[in-house]
Image (tube, helix red, strand yellow):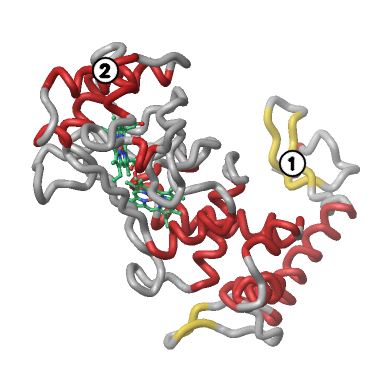
Amino acid sequence: MSENNPFPNESNTGHFWDDSLRELTNDPPGWWRIGFHASWLWCLVYFVLYPAIPTLDGYSKGTMGWTAVGEYKEDLASIDKVRQKWEDKINNPNTTAAMIIADDELRNYTVRSAKVLFGDYCSACHGSGGSGNSAMSADQSGYPVLADDDWLYGGTIEQIQTTITNGRKGIMPNYGARLSEAEIADLAKHVVALSDGSEHAAGKELFNNPTKGGCFACHGMDAKGMAALGSANLTDAVWRFNVVGKGDNRQASATHTIAHGVNSELIDPASRNAVMPAFGPLGKDLSAGSIKKLAVYVHQLGGGK
Ligand code: HEC
Ligand code: HEC
């Protein structure tokens, strides 16, 4: 082979193709060699410093003592430290929910951390973000929207906190048992007229007649409702109860509510059902701090007063 080497003056391996293509024995270029040695050196250093090599009973631990879990825990601890500062403030019995709202930083923290609580405890009924819930119960009672400025029990931070702590159960009697169908129809017409900004004469007369409707006793002479009783404002366009899928069904819905009442299922099985459970010590027993957070969150949803 090498006897008939056509390139006797260069160092090649003696392998030729097509007379001129040949394999040389030059050293690899300098940059390549530096890269090569740097890589294995890097591996060696890494293997010494960090956990790397599997052994029979685990793995080499490395001289730095680093672990992925350790790094994660350190990160968590540093976040917890920041959090703890806020949590301590919120859990302090002297910090009222109103004070949290007044403090921009504390409020922002509270709203963010309450989102999770709201998802866990409230959104099954009130929808995510308090947008209400179209999944109506059998009597079409549904759950109130919390992200508007229409309140049954009042929208101040204190009222919201009381609602969450003690729960709410507004009661309205079933008038089907004591008024005629025609009277109930007139009352319903009056209620529908009220939400359109007018009134219905015969219905209004019954509404304000203590021996007939006596509705004013709970809904007020102006029919705007009373926060202490949770009696709905009947003069706005917001309908708490509904009959799904019947177009303008306000007449039907009002008729049902008036005839069967609210939370009167003991005397009328067709009664509207509207119970807000208690989350304080008498109910689900959430911590005072969690309830403060939730109250601030609901207040900030849009309609807090
Ligand atoms: C089992 C269903 C259910 C759950 C869970 C629930 N609620 Fe309610 N909530 C209701 C109902 C029903 C009402 C309306 C009561 C009424 O109509 O009288 C209500 C009313 C309210 C009101 C009063 C609204 C107003 O207009 O005054 C607030 C505030 C409220 N809920 C907040 C919460 C918060 C915060 C949570 C989570 C900690 C929560 N709710 C969990 C069913 C629920
Ligand atoms: C004992 C107090 C009380 C009396 C008396 C009363 N209501 Fe109510 N009413 C309530 C409460 C509480 C609610 C429920 C609000 C809720 O939980 O969403 C309600 C709800 C309603 C609703 C439903 C409103 C909606 O948005 O869907 C109508 C309509 C209504 N009442 C009409 C009347 C009429 C008409 C009378 C008189 C015949 C009357 N009420 C008497 C307490 C009362």
Q: Residue at x 22, y 19 (%)?
A: 252
Bin the neighbour count of mark 1 within 10 Å (Cα to Cα): few under 14, some 14-19, many 20 and up. few
Q: Are marks 2 and 1 in contact (CB under 8 Å)?
A: no
Q: Quadrant of the N terminus?
A: top right
Left or right: 120, with 51 as reference point: left
> Residue 10 occupies which quadrant of the picture?
top right
> How crowded is the residue under tag 2: few (<14 C-alpha within 10 Å), some, or many (20+)?
some
Rendered position, 43 above or below 157 = below
- Does the rendering let one see residue 243? no
Residue 247 image point, x, y percent: 29, 11
Q: Nearer the viewer, residue 57 or 245?
A: 245
Left or right: 283 as drawn, with respect to 34: left
Query: Position of 165 compared to 50: left or right?
Result: left
Give the x, y percent position of residue 195: 42, 20
Q: Residue at x 69, y 40 (%)?
A: 15
| Residue located beneath label 1 in the image | 23
| Label 2 SS | helix
Name the element at disc 1.
strand
> Foreground: 237 or 206?
206
If the image is split into quadrants, where does the C terminus sit? top right
Q: Residue at x 54, y 47 (%)?
A: 155
User: Which amino acid does the dot numbered 1 rest on?
Assistant: Glu
Query: Above or below — where is 58 with respect to 228?
Result: below
Using the image as rendered, state which of residue 162 and residue 126 is in the foreground.
162
Q: Which residue is mark 2?
A: 251
